[in-house]
Image (cartoon, rainbow, N blue to C red):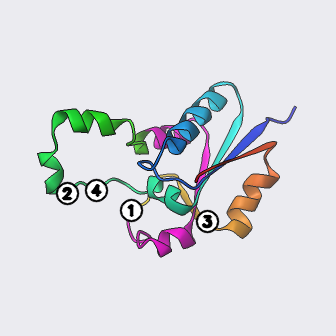
């Protein structure tokens, strides 16, 4: 029997709203229940594909504020999804438009496009969920 697959299209970045956190949690649950998972990052969602780069000014943030924003730092959880079998690709044109195409991409995330990457996710999926504002 063919594995059922879920594709999620994420337009929102990790600090805009709860969309990206919801996508991560849904993907974790789906993978644990035997579903295939594809995540396509576009719009501000492409920011999740990049490795975090700290500035010295972040050292001045209070411990309480750092604890508050920790839930929105999803890069490590996204990488864990990859090790669990998820497929993740970005819309490289959106990376270019935001000036982040030269930043280091997290290991296992593919740079892609709508015509090939997104369409191949769709063709292999039973369900498409769209997240973003």
Alpha carbon separation for disc pair 3 and 4 = 23 Å
Q: Tell which tag, 1 or 4, sits nearer the viewer.
A: 4
Q: Are marks 4 and 2 in contact (CB under 8 Å)?
A: yes
Q: Does dot 2 land on a helix, a strand or a loop?
A: loop
How far from the left and from the top, in percent, is residue 41? 57, 56
Secondary structure at badge 1 equals loop
Question: Which residue lies most toward the front here?
Answer: 133
The CA distance from mark 1 to mark 4 is: 10 Å
Image position, residue 114 (x, y; %)? 69, 67
Q: CB of mark 1 within 8 Å of CB of mark 4? A: no
Q: Residue at x 30, y 35 (%)?
A: 68
**Which-is-in-front pick, marks 2 and 1?**
2
Q: In the current view of this chain or complex, which residue is farthest to the left? A: 60
User: Circle 3 sits on which residue?
Assistant: 112
Q: Which mark is residue 104?
A: 1
Find out whether residue 7 is within the magenta segment.
no
Q: Which residue is mark 4?
A: 53
- Which quadrant does the C terminus fall into? bottom right
Read off the magenta span. 77-103
Query: Which of marks 3 and 2 precedes in the sequence?
Result: 2
How much space separates mark 2 and mark 3, taking CA atoms? 29 Å
Image quadrant in which you'd find residue 89 = bottom right
Residue 13 drawn above or below residue 85 = below
Inter-mark Cα distance, 3 to 1 = 15 Å
- Residue 42 rendering spot, x and y as whole percentages: 57, 60
Q: Quadrant of residue 93?
A: bottom right
């Amino acid at each position: 029997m063919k594995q059922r697959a879920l594709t999620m299209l994420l337009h929102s970045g990790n600090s805009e709203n709860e969309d990206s956190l919801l996508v991560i949690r849904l993907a974790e649950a789906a993978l644990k229940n035997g579903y295939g998972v594809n995540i396509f990052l576009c719009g501000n969602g492409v920011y999740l594909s990049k490795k975090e780069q700290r500035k010295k000014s972040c050292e001045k943030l209070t411990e309480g504020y750092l604890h508050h924003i920790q839930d929105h730092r999803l890069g490590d959880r996204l990488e864990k999804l990859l090790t669990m079998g998820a497929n993740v690709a970005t819309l490289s044109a959106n990376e270019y438009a935001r000036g982040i195409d030269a930043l280091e991409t997290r290991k296992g995330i593919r740079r892609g496009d709508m015509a090939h990457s997104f369409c191949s996710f769709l063709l292999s999926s039973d369900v498409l969920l769209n997240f973003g504002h």
